[in-house]
Amino acid sequence: MDQTEQTMIDNLGEDTGKSLDLWIGIVQKENFKKHGEIVKFLKNEHSFTHGYANLIVHKALKSDAGSSSNPDELIEKQYKGKEHFLQIYETLRSKIKAFGEDVEFAPKNSYVSVRRKKQFAMLIPATKSRFEIGINLKGHPAEGVLEIDTKTNGMCSHKINLKDENDISPEVINYIKDAYEAAG
């Protein structure tokens, strides 16, 4: 477990009066099966922020790297049937790692969260024909390959869609690096 996650877990108890384990129990009693259902429940019924709700969901469903006994299995699961996007992931991972030693890659069930002090990007094999990079550049206009993100519930402000490795241009890397720098 990384320090950011541990801090969130510590703050969860202080902010809500209940531990992570208690919240996981509350969620499990509801018998939800889908990530989005649990997030909606926690936000609507318990006034959670998206960050806390997402943390509890991943822990309850054991869908994050910290809950998985083998984070590589999460990557394999993401790319099943989309193996042609693995090279995009590996290339992006290599280029992003070069930004600094403080970059962390945290696989989830359907994406990889890329964090510094906070999440600044998401690497998502979205469909069989589209690889998506979600990035946090709040206040930045949509321009060039950078589009406003309307799907990730505030987890990212923008997105970039790729079809193949040739779409990883200097412009794409510069936007990701801008998000990295803003997250520090």
Image (spheres, rainbow, N blue to C red):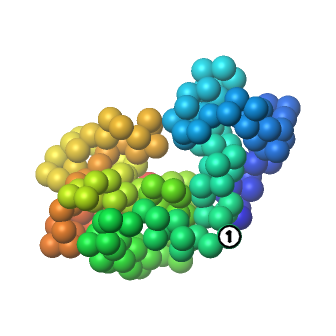
Whether residue 138 appears in this view of the structure is: no
Relative to the observer, which residue lies in front, 37 or 115?
37
Q: Quadrant of the N terminus?
A: bottom right
For disc 1, the neighbor class at 10 Å (few under 14, some 14 to 19, many from 20) is few
**Quadrant of residue 20 in the image?**
top right
What residue lies at 36% left-to-right and 77% top-to-bottom?
90
Task: From the top left corner, tell me how far across and down residue 38 is, in percent.
Answer: 60, 34
**Quadrant of residue 35 in the image?**
top right
Q: Is residue 26 above or below residue 110?
A: above
Task: From the top left corner, tell me how far across and down residue 5 is, in percent.
Answer: 68, 55
Task: Please indicate whether residue 57 sits to the left or right of residue 111 in the image.
Answer: right
Task: Please indicate whether residue 86 sits to the left or right of residue 165 in the image.
Answer: right
Residue type pointed to by label 1: Ser
Task: Please indicate whether residue 153 sits to the left or right of residue 151 in the image.
Answer: right
Task: From the top left corner, tell me how far across and down residue 140 is, in percent.
Answer: 29, 43
What residue lies at 19% left-to-right and 68% top-to-bottom?
164
Whether residue 142 appears in this view of the structure is: yes
Task: From the top left corner, tell me how far across and down residue 117 is, in percent.
Answer: 58, 58
Relative to the observer, which residue lies in front, 135 or 91?
91
SS for tag 1?
A: loop
- In the picture of the structure, the residue carrying the numbered disc 1 is 69
